[in-house]
Image (tube, helix red, strand yellow):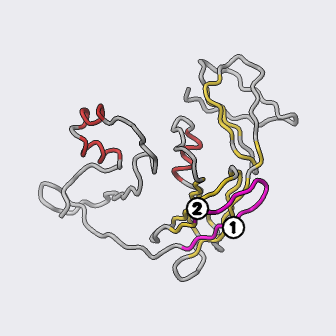
Amino acid sequence: SMVSETRTTGDDGSFRVGGLDGKGFMVRAEKAGFVPTSLNGIETGREDLVVTLQPGGALVGVVTDPAGAAVGKFRIFPRRQGDKPVNPNDWQRFAAVQGGTVFLDAGGRFRVEGLEPGTYGVEARAADLAPGRVEGVAVVAGKDAEASVRLAAGHALSGVVVRRADGSGVQGARVKLPADGMFGEFDMGDLDLGGLEEEVGGADRAMDMMGGFAKGQVS
């Protein structure tokens, strides 16, 4: 159910959410320093729900540009090795994974808390610079793991958006370059695209849609 209600637990960890309609809710609990926990398919009317949180680790570091200077605004994307793609129904976690965490810091410093222990890859992204990555960062509960990232200069792409009728320029058009698919990077596994192919007219068109692009004319 697409219901958004937030409560803060009391001294004993208890909470209550009233006025709910339906069943099959997703319940998510989170607190700084702990690994967030989500429970699916929770029915209303019960009073014995227990949500367990475990202490998490943290990633800390500095993001720099190709010259070694601190980057003041950037996004951090931590990925734990072996994790499956996030369920889009867990929309808060899904949005966090796809959008990363934004940092504004003149010294380029960042800290991401509440991470489940494991081995991580960390990616940093900033405007007008190519992403930078570090791999094999070991995160341990209750401790900080160093994961500084240096960004690369990258390449540029320039062009023009025109009207099909006469080739004149279109002012104010937004040009987007999705780096990932419609739902970010994910493993489609054995997903059958047959129905989608029939709907949109072929496998090529289906894959274009899943990648966030519709084919157009390139000059």
Q: Dot 2 corresponds to which residue?
A: 122
Observer-nearest residue: 38 or 118? Answer: 118
Type of amino acid under label 1:
Glu
Magenta span contains residue 139: yes
Q: How far apart are marks 1 and 2 (CA)?
A: 10 Å
Q: Dot 1 corresponds to which residue?
A: 146
Q: Are marks 1 and 2 in contact (CB under 8 Å)?
A: no
Chain part drawn in magenta: 135-150
Q: Taking 132 as reference, is 42 above or below it?
A: above
Magenta span contains residue 51: no
Q: Taking 200 as reference, is 57 above or below it?
A: below
Observer-nearest residue: 196 or 18? Answer: 196
Helix, strand, or loop for circle 2? strand
Percent x, y for residue 89? 53, 35
Percent x, y for residue 114? 71, 51
Q: Where, quadrant-wise, is the N terminus in this rendering?
A: top right
Magenta: main secondary structure equals: strand
Q: Where, quadrant-wise, is the C terminus in this rendering?
A: bottom left
Type of amino acid under label 2:
Val
Categorize mark 1 by other alpha carbons within 10 Å: few (<14), some (14-19), many (20+).
some
**Left or right of 105 in this view: 215:** left
Q: Taking 22 as reference, is 25 above or below it?
A: below
